[in-house]
Amino acid sequence: MSELIHASHPAIVKRLKRAQGHLAAVLSMFETQRPCVDLAQQLHAVESAISSAKRELIHDHIEHCLKDTADGGSHGSLAELKQLAKYL
C-alpha cells in the first residue's frame, strides 16, 4: 500500500485541509448572510484550491507512472493514464 503514496501526497492533504477550513468559513458566511459577491469570491477560492490539489495529484501520478514504465515496470500504466485523463 505504501507504494501507492507519492511524495506529493502530504502536501496535497495539507492543501485540502486548508480548503476544508475555507469551505467551513464560507458556510459560516452563508449563515451570517454575507453579500453574494463575498460568497462567490470565497467559493471561487475554495474551488481553485481543490482544482490545484487535483492537478498536483494527477501530474504527480502521471510522472510516477511514466517513470515506472521507463524503469521496466508495468502496472497497467497506460490504462491508468487514460483513466486519469478524464479528470483533467
Image (cartoon, rainbow, N blue to C red):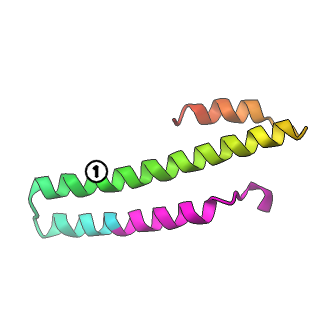
Relative to 62, does residue 41 appear above or below in the rendering? Answer: below
Q: Which one is in front, 31 or 10?
A: 10
Q: Position of residue 77 (x, y in %)?
A: 77, 35
Relative to 23, does residue 62 appear above or below in the rendering? Answer: above
Relative to 83, 42 lies left or right: left
Quadrant showing the N terminus = bottom right
* Image point (50%, 53%), residue name: 53
Figure quadrant of residue 43: bottom left
* Residue 1 appears anywhere in the view: no
Q: Tell me which amino acid carries mark 1.
A: His
Most extreme residue toward the right, as rendered?
A: 72
Q: Which residue is mark 1?
A: 44
Relative to 68, does residue 29 appear above or below in the rendering? Answer: below
* Image point (43%, 53%), residue name: 50
Q: Position of residue 75 (x, y in %)?
A: 83, 40
Q: Position of residue 38 (x, y in %)?
A: 15, 58
**Magenta part, dominant SS:** helix
* Image point (82%, 42%), residue name: 68
Figure quadrant of residue 70: top right
Relative to 78, 15 lies left or right: left
Range drawn in magenta = 1-21
Q: Position of residue 23 (x, y in %)?
A: 32, 63
The reply to whether the magenta stretch includes residue 2 is: yes
